[in-house]
């Protein structure tokens, strides 16, 4: 039997690959317990929530920083902008303000791009549990082509640390923008 894959969404179990059982052969039963799959799905959903919530916290801080830097009579409506467009707008605003010229904020903008990419993977990707017991968690998503990446607790911890760092850098920008 081919390797089993279980996807998030109660009651969905997908077997990838093909298996033909010749006549007269014993049929193997998939060795999985639905309760175990639900536990793995709870872990993934918790991780997914961590990714999305921490991304939202960064985006909110980004909104605040932009609002601090925008002239009061500005026609910009940042509420209608995507996370990525907000990041680009902040970069443009910073480049126009003399007090920021001496600072190298390239790491902040690289980190923001990575946060946006990761959030998009978790928001739009498809999770699968691989291995005969579903012990590995994978996320499939499109980035030019179909990508598949194993998700571990270490990935999540690293992401959260990156979000905290970005929020701290955005706080510094807001402090420098004080009148």
Image: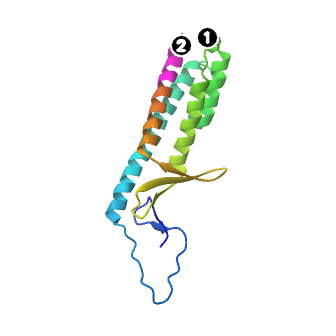
Q: Where is residue 161 in the image (x, y as percent from the top left)?
A: 45, 32
Residue 173 lies in quadrant: top right
Pointer 1: what residue?
A: 99
> In the rendered structure, are the residues bearing label 1 and label 2 in contact, judged by CB atoms less than 8 Å apart?
yes
**Residue 93 placement (x, y as % from top left):** 64, 21
Mark 1 vs 2, N-terminal side? 1
- Is 7 in the magenta? no
- Residue 154 coordinates in the image, percent (x, y): 43, 41
| Outermost residue, bottom side | 24
**Vertical side of 29 occupied by 67: above or below:** above
> CA separation, marks 1 and 2?
8 Å
Residue plotted at (66% across, 24% down): 92
Residue 140 vs residue 29, the one in the foreground: 29
For the question of whether residue 130 can be seen, the reply is yes
Image spot of residue 69 (x, y percent): 58, 19
Q: Give the range drawn in magenta.
A: 168-179
Residue placed under numbered mark 2 in the picture: 176
The C terminus sits in image quarter? top right
Residue 169 shown in magenta: yes
Question: Can you say whether 96 is above or below 163 in the image?
Answer: above
């Amino acid at each position: 039997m081919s390797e089993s894959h279980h996807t998030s969404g109660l009651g969905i179990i997908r077997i990838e690959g093909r298996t033909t059982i010749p006549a007269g052969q014993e049929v193997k039963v998939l060795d999985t317990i639905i309760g175990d799959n639900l536990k793995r799905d709870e872990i993934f959903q918790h991780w997914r929530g961590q990714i999305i919530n921490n991304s939202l916290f960064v985006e909110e801080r980004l909104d605040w920083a932009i609002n601090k830097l925008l002239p009061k009579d500005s026609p910009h409506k940042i509420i209608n902008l995507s996370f990525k467009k907000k990041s680009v707008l902040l970069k443009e605003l910073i480049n126009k303000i003399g007090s920021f010229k001496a600072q190298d904020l390239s790491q902040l903008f690289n980190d923001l791009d990575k946060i946006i990419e990761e959030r998009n993977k978790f928001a739009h990707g498809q999770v699968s549990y691989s291995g005969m017991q579903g012990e590995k968690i994978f996320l499939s998503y499109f980035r030019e082509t179909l990508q598949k990446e194993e998700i571990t607790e270490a990935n999540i911890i690293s992401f959260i640390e990156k979000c905290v760092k970005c929020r701290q850098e955005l706080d510094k920008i807001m402090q420098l923008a004080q009148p």
